Image: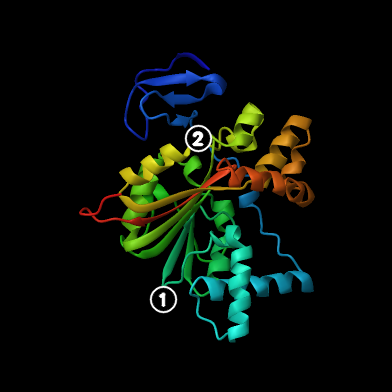
Amino acid sequence: MIQQAADSVERCDLCGAGDVALCAGGLRRCRRCGLLWGAPAAGPALSDYAPHRPARVPHGRLWAWRRALKRVALAAGRGYPAALSPAARLAGRLLACLAALPLQRVPAWVAGGRLLDAGCGNGSYVAAMRALGWDALGLEPALEAALLGERVIVGRIERAPLAGASCDVITLWHVLEHTASPAAALAEARRLLRAGGALLLEVPDIGSFQARLFGRRWLHLDPPRHRYHFTRRTLRAYLQRAGFIEIRIWSAPSPVGIAGSLGMLLGRPALAESRLARALCWPAAGIEALAGRGGCLRAAARRGDKHEHA
C-alpha cells in the first residue's frame, strides 16, 4: 500500500521517471513502469552470505555417479563435444529432458568460447564451466569471495575491466538485484558480448506466489543486499532497453525461497540452508513454477545490433 510520495529528485533506473512512490517496507515504486527498489546498501554484508563462502565439495561414489550422468546429459543435449556411443547419447538426451530445469543454467556449446560469470561469488560456476570445456572466468566485487576461486577478477559488472566484444556468453545468476543500476550492468554486459553473444540470468520474482504469501518475511527481499525487485514485465523492459533481442523469460522454482521464508516466519533461519528443508519444499516450488509464478525468473537473450529489434 502506498503511504506517501517519495523525494521527487529520486528517479527510476529503468524509465528515468521521477514519479516515485514510497511503499510499505521502505520500497520505492515507479508509477510509470512499476519497477520496485529499496534504499542502497551501506556496504557489502559477506559474513553470512552463502555465495561468498568456500564451496562445499561433495564426496563419495554417489556424487561421482550423479556428476558423470550430468556430464553425459550435457554432452548429448547441449552440443558439447564428447566421444559417446549411440546408447550413451540416447541416455543423455533422456537425462537432459529429466534435468531440464538445472540444465537451463548451462549455455549451448561454443567451440573455443569465452564465458564470463559476473558476480561469481566463490567461483563454483566458473569451475564447473571450465570442467565442461569453456574458457571461463569470473568477475566478483567482493575480494574475500574472489580469492576463493580460480580465474576470478575483482570488479563489478557495471565497470568490467575487460575488452569490449570479448565474451561469447555472460551469466548473471542472482546479480542484477544487487547492483546500483541494473541498466548500467546490462549495458556493460552488451558491450562485453560479441555480436550474437548470449546473456543468461536469474533474479527473484517479486510477483511470485511465495513473495505474496510471505510478504516482508520473503527470503528473497533480503534488504539491504537486494536493492532491485523484478517482475516479468520490468525484466523484459530492462533487456529491451539495453539492446537485447530474442528475449525469453520463464518461471523458475525456488525451494530455498520457501524454506528460508518459513524459517524467518518460525524463527529458524537455518532452514534456508537445510538440504532436507529445501528438498521438502521442491514440490511446492515446482507447482509454483509450472503455474508461471515460481520464486525466480530466468531469462535468455542475445546481443542485438542497431538494425535489429527486440
- Residue at point 57%, 67% (across, down): 127
- Residue at point 66%, 59% (across, down): 55
The residue closer to the viewer here, 188 or 97, is 97
Residue 203: give x, y in percent of width and height: 52, 45
Q: In the rendered view, how is the structure colored?
A: rainbow
Decide if residue 289 is on the left or right side of residue 156. Answer: right
State how far apart marks 1 and 2 are (Cα).
36 Å
Residue 11: give x, y in percent of width and height: 35, 27
One can see residue 148 in this view: no
One can see residue 68 in this view: yes
Residue 56: assigned label: none
- Residue at point 53%, 71% (across, down): 77
Task: Report which residue position mark 1 lands on.
Answer: 112
* Amino acid type, callout 2: Arg
* Label 1 element class: loop
Residue 294: give x, y in percent of width and height: 59, 43
The residue closer to the viewer here, 18 or 180, is 18
* Amino acid type, callout 1: Gly
Quadrant housing residue 64: bottom right
Quadrant housing residue 259: top right
> How crowded is the residue under tag 1: few (<14 C-alpha within 10 Å), some, or many (20+)?
few
Above or below: residue 228 compared with residue 203: above
The residue closer to the viewer here, 298 or 270, is 298
Above or below: residue 212 compared with residue 280: above
Task: Report which residue position mark 2 lands on.
Answer: 227
Q: Residue furthest top?
A: 4
- Residue at point 50%, 35% (across, down): 227
* Label 2 element class: loop
